[in-house]
Image: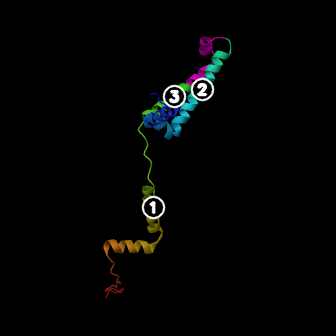
Amino acid sequence: MTKTKANQAADLYSTARQNPYVQRLIEDEELRDSLRDAFEAARGAYGRATGNGKGAVKAVSSDRKVQKDLRSAAESLREASDRLRAPRKRKKSRLRRLIQLGIVAAIVALILSEDARKTVLDALFGAEEEFEYTSTTSINGA
């Protein structure tokens, strides 16, 4: 019994979705950009090396633009390879950002509001006893 093309496509799709490299390619925009840059630079080098009539070896060894394109392609492939090998960056959760924003807002409120500072200090250390100091000594030394 042969599979239909739709079943083959569905199997291929599910296999590709489970592949970690394909997942990384789907999720990582910088990886896609690096691969696209490498492809475009290599295509440019190939077009220039084969289209000038000198021969590919002579073009690669003497044409500065071909060398620059090949160097750019190699650099972009190296970046893509490094991104594939690097561990995935975890997405920051919204809850974490909200908590951080709340902490920063509380600190700013404490800095700017004297009443808020007094309230927090009273809650932490208890209310201050207010008293007035009067000196028992006289100014004349008597």
In the picture of the structure, the residue carrying the numbered disc 3 is: 77
Image check: 7 left or right of 137?
A: right
Q: Report how far apart the C-alphas of labels 3 and 1 lie in the structure.
A: 41 Å
> Which residue type does callout 3 highlight?
Leu
**Upstream in the sequence, badge 3 or badge 2?**
2
Label 1: element kind: helix
**Predominant secondary structure, magenta span:** helix
Q: Report how far apart the C-alphas of labels 3 and 2 lie in the structure.
A: 10 Å
- Please name whichever residue, 83 or 64, is drawn nearer the observer in this view of the structure: 83
> Which residue type does callout 1 highlight?
Val
Q: Residue furthest right?
A: 52
Count of labels in the image = 3
Indicate which disc residue 104 carries. Answer: 1
In the picture of the structure, the residue carrying the numbered disc 2 is: 41
> Which residue type does callout 2 highlight?
Ala
Label 2: element kind: helix
Label 3: element kind: helix
Stretch of the chain drawn in magenta: 54-72
